[in-house]
Each structure stands twice: as structure tokens, then as C-alpha cells.
Image (cartoon, rainbow, N blue to C red):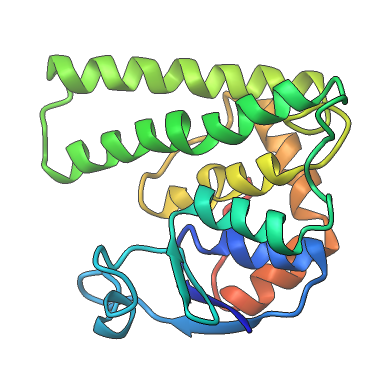
Amino acid sequence: MLTVHHLGKSQSERIVWLCEELGIDYRLERYERDPVTMLAPLEYKALHPLGAAPVITDGDLVLAESGAIIDYILARYGDAKLVPSVSDTQFPDYLYWYHFSNATLQALLGRVMMMNRARVAPDNPTLRAISERTAIAMRQTDERVAAVPYLAGEMFTAADVMIGFTLSTMRYFLPMDLAPYPGILAYLGRISSRPAYIAAMQKADPEMKLLLS
């Protein structure tokens, strides 16, 4: 049976949300972070060499990485949901934003987070360059969701599932004021009101305050 191994406050919330949106049967295994280090417990690290979320198991399969897991679940269990057809005019935008969310925006935020943890000086040229690129990516996202309801356009897709963590729970690790991004704030209101999102977060992190404003 498909099992989602969810680490609290992590990217694996995407996978729980995806399963709820698809309405598929799955088992949820929850793991709590170490309260001091905030790292995954040893049981989670035993699932995969990097010990990073998300991880799923499905029979003998063990699979990590958000994109790989989402692609696998959509292909195996998705029944053509949450992805526009190739002939749909929204398909190219879906592809772009689906990959942008993790490969560009999440990656930039992760670099800023790691440099902050390393106490790199704010005027460090590398940190300044990454911060500037991050601001550009945030503005691009804000403009997109101010112009259309969802990243692909009118259709809610897996691209929205992918970016949800990046714009919300990620801020537990890299605090960020969204006041300059009214489009993103309105967008978070739209996606977080979906019944599948509400159900997913209640199951995955029932005690966590959702960072949606």
C-alpha cells in the first residue's frame, strides 16, 4: 500500500495534500523532529540515505524527492487529475511553474536559509546576489497569482501543491514577511480553503500553526 512517511513541518506535507486531492487510499506514518536540533529522527533517516523529507514507500519501492514522488503518484494513481492535457493551453505554464516552485524558488530560499544559519554577514556579495534573485522570484510569483487564480491558469494543478509548502511552512525555517506580496497572500487564501488542504494539514501536522498570512 502507498505509505507517505511524513516528517513534521517538512516538504512531505505536499504529498499528503496530493493524496487528499486525488482521493486515493494511502497510509500516513508521522515522524517528529528532534526538538533541539529540528532534524529528522533516526527512524526517518533509516528510510533513505539523506534522511530528508519527503519519502514514500509503495510495496518494495522506496522513493524520495518531491518532484519524483508527485510524478510517480500522478502517473500511477492520478487518473489524469491535477495535470492539464498536453493539448490544453495551460500545459506549458503548468510545466514551468511546477518545476519553478522547487528548482528555483525553493532552492533560492534554501540557500538564503543556510547562509543565515552560517551567520554570513548581510553585506556578503554572494548572500546579496542570492537575496536579490530570491526577491525577483517572489515578485514573479506574486504577479502570476495576482493575474490568474492558480499557477497554471484557471485550473488547480500539482504545481499549486508543489509551491504551497514553499510559501507557507517554509517560513518556519526562513521567516519572511509576505505583506509586499498581496497576490501571494490572496493565493494562499484560495489554496488553503480547499477541503483537501484542510484535511491534509489536520492529518499531517494537527498542532502546527499554518503560516498563511
Q: Position of residue 110 (x, y in %)?
A: 33, 40
The quadrant of the image that shows the N terminus is: bottom right
Q: State left or right for residue 210 relative to residue 39.
A: right
Q: State left or right for residue 50 relative to residue 23.
A: left
Q: Quadrant of residue 209?
A: bottom right
Q: Position of residue 13 (x, y in %)?
A: 56, 63
The quadrant of the image that shows the C terminus is: top right
Query: Who is closer to the viewer here, 98 or 132?
Result: 98
Q: State left or right for residue 5 relative to residue 151.
A: left
In this picture, is 132 found above or below 162? above
Q: Quadrant of residue 126?
A: top left
Outermost front residue: 60
> What residue is drawn where x is 36% and y is 52%?
173
The answer to whether residue 77 is seen in the rendering is yes
The answer to whether residue 210 is seen in the rendering is no
Q: Position of residue 71 (x, y in %)?
A: 61, 50
In this picture, is 137 found above or below 54? above
Q: Position of residue 118 (x, y in %)?
A: 11, 42
Q: Quadrant of residue 180?
A: top right
> What residue is drawn where x is 75% and y is 72%?
199
Query: Who is closer to the viewer here, 109 or 50?
Result: 50
> What residue is drawn where x is 70% and y is 20%?
144
Q: State left or right for residue 168 relative to residue 106.
A: right
Query: Who is closer to the viewer here, 81 or 192?
Result: 81
> What residue is drawn where x is 52% and y is 24%?
138
Query: Who is closer to the viewer here, 79 or 103?
Result: 79
